[in-house]
Amino acid sequence: MQKVVINTDYGGFGLSPKAVELLFKIKGWHLIRQDTDTGFTHFYKDEISNDHYFTERDLERNDLDLVKVVEELGKEANGHFASLKIVEIPRGVVWEIVEYDGMEHVAEKHRTWR
């Protein structure tokens, strides 16, 4: 089985600042944290620039380090409006994440024509 992280509530996938910090630590990346007046935090890898801006949406959802962070932190891994869950799917299945208003599920990928 392989583990995949999804968001199970409306709003969208996202990690808490604590989860991002742990992820960077596990990966051995240099973290630069920038807090804003609006309560959001921006993260950068190595330097503050657009090219180094970190967004968890760039992560593969079956990234072993991401899964480890969500397993370790539980609900504390949830970002704004997120309710993260780990689902297990059989190895070898070609899958995709299907999303509606931020709520996600994993589906087996099939051919589609339009």
Image (tube, rainbow, N blue to C red):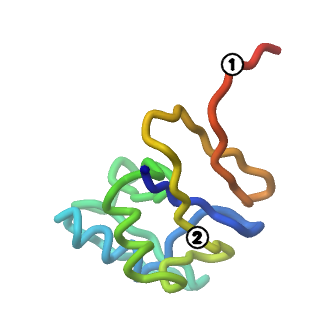
Which one is closest to the eye, mark 1 or mark 2? 1
Q: Are marks 1 and 2 in contact (CB under 8 Å)?
A: no
Q: Secondary structure at mark 1?
A: loop
Please name the amino acid that badge 1 sits on.
Arg
Residue hosting label 1: 111
Give the residue at x 63% y 48%: 106
- Location of residue 96 in the rendering, given as x and y in whole percent from the top left corner: 60, 39
Pointer 2 residue: 84
Residue at horizontal 46 percent and vertical 59 percent from the top = 56
Q: Would residue 28 appear left or right of 7 to someone viewing this image?
A: left
Mark-to-mark CA distance, 1 and 2: 28 Å
Which residue type does callout 2 highlight? Leu
Which residue is outermost to the left? Answer: 28
**Along the viewing direction, whichever of 10 and 34 lies nearer the viewer:** 10
Q: Earlier in the sequence, mark 1 or mark 2?
A: 2
Q: Secondary structure at mark 2?
A: strand
